[in-house]
Structures are given as structure tokens and as C-alpha cells.
Amino acid sequence: DAGVIQSPRHEVTEMGQEVTLRCKPISGHDYLFWYRQTMMRGLELLIYFNNNVPIDDSGMPEDRFSAKMPNASFSTLKIQPSEPRDSAVYFCASSLGTGLGYEQYFGPGTRLTVT
Amino acid sequence: QKEVEQDPGPLSVPEGAIVSLNCTYSNSAFQYFMWYRQYSRKGPELLMYTYSSGNKEDGRFTAQVDKSSKYISLFIRDSQPSDSATYLCAMSPTSGTYKYIFGTGTRLKVLA
């Protein structure tokens, strides 16, 4: 199994530009999560989906952030317009919602730098 | 005050030492407790989980939960340089939610 795949691995962009992060979850997993990690705030859940439907987006910081999951094998997180304070590592994770569903498998992350 | 507090470290220990990593929390509803390990420039990976109070052992790793004190610990015996990583605690109130609250992580260095 290839694990959770994220692209790009690194993104450097200028303030005001649109940024799109991509994620392919593990095949068969029905939950998908988007996290943001910074030194100051640690790992924060932004939004999660179940069977492609957004369940909880209360962690999305503001309207500049949006996430979609058009099918079971693909999700995007978009920031428009980007700001320097959005600089962070963004992780996508997936899990299989049976039993406790406690194990979330994380991708390698996308390191975003907004200048 | 954050819901989950974790000392950021870094914690440096010699190879073979016993390591104790800890988290405190404020939400008494938390029932599920997890430890994730994160190597540099990688995503977190689940190391151990426990439900409610008590101990759980897996090889060199022991997870301990004290709900009365709102305190969880991860012990690593015979620590190895390969254990050098950041350790994140995570917790959740019930099995019906996948909304985990993570600590900020403790960076561990095991010196050869």
C-alpha cells in the first residue's frame, strides 16, 4: 500500500496567491482529515470528511480556507488569498471508521511558505 | 489554557536510559488517549493507544493514564538513537468522534 499521498511536498508562494494542496487517502479508508502543524500551535485539525462529506469544519481558520472531496480517492485544501501567517506544514490523514477508528494514517505533509 | 499541555523539550538522554514523556489535560470527558511518534520531516505515526485509565505495554513502550490527575505518560525502556523523534499525545472524548486534540509534542534526542 502506498500510504497517504500528498502533493506538492513543498510550496513557496507570494502573499495573495492561491494555493492548492492535494491528498490521496489510503484506498478503502472512509475518513479523511486535514491538519495544520506549526511550532506555536502544534497539530490542529482543520476539517474532516466521512464518505466524501464534510463532517466538521470548525477548525478552518477563516473563509480563505476551503476543502473539497469530490470522490473517495482525492481531496484538496485551498487557500485563497494566501497570507504569511498561513506558513505551516499541512498534513492529510485517513482512517477506516470501524471499531474505534482511532488510527489515523498521516501523509508526509506539504510544507507551505508564504512570503 | 490549552486543552492538552505537553512540554516541548528537547529532552536529551543517553542510550539505554528510561524515558518518561508526559501530557496533562483539562477536559475530563477524554476517554481515548494516543501517542504518536513523528520523525523529522515526516507525518506522525500511531505508537500506542489506551482507553480510559490504566497501563498498556508494547515491547519497550508503556502507556499510562491517570484520569484522576488528568495526566498521561509514555515510558520508553532501553532507549535507542532510533527513538529520537517528536512524541505527540492525542486524546478524544468518545469513540464516535474522530476529532483528536493533539499536544504540541516533546522532542526527544537519544544520544549514542
Image (cartoon, coloured by chain):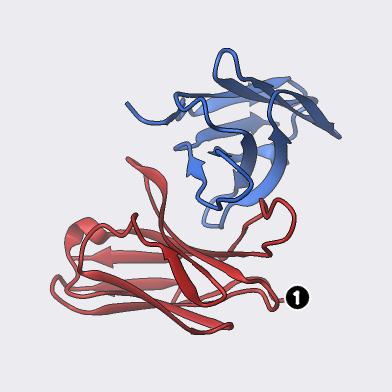
Chain colours: A red, B blue
Label 1 neighbourhood size at 10 Å, few (<14), some (14-19), many (20+)? few
- Residue at 57% in and 66% down: A107
Asked if residue B43 is positioned above or below residue A54 in the image, the reply reads: above
- Residue at 67% in and 48% down: B46
Q: Which chain carries label 1?
A: A
| Number of on-image labels | 1
Residue A114 falls in image quadrant: bottom left
Which one is nearer the viewer's eye here, B44 or B85?
B44
- Residue at 36% in and 61% down: A57
Asked if residue A50 is positioned above or below residue A59 in the image, the reply reads: below
Residue A1 falls in image quadrant: bottom right
Q: Which x, y percent locates residue A20?
A: 34, 79
Please indicate whether residue A7 sits to the left or right of residue B38 in the image.
Answer: left
Find the residue positioned furthest to the right. B59
Q: Which x, y percent locates residue A96?
A: 68, 65
Please indicate whether residue B55 sits to the left or right of residue A89 in the image.
Answer: right
Residue B22 appears in view: yes
Find the residue positioned furthest to the left. A16
Which one is nearer the viewer's eye here, A6 or A55?
A55
Residue B87 appears in view: no
Residue identifier under label 1: A1
For the C terminus of chain A, give its image quadrant. Answer: bottom left
Which one is nearer the viewer's eye here, B19 or A59?
A59
Helix, strand, or loop for circle 1?
loop
Q: Which x, y percent locates residue A82?
A: 19, 70
Residue B78 falls in image quadrant: top right
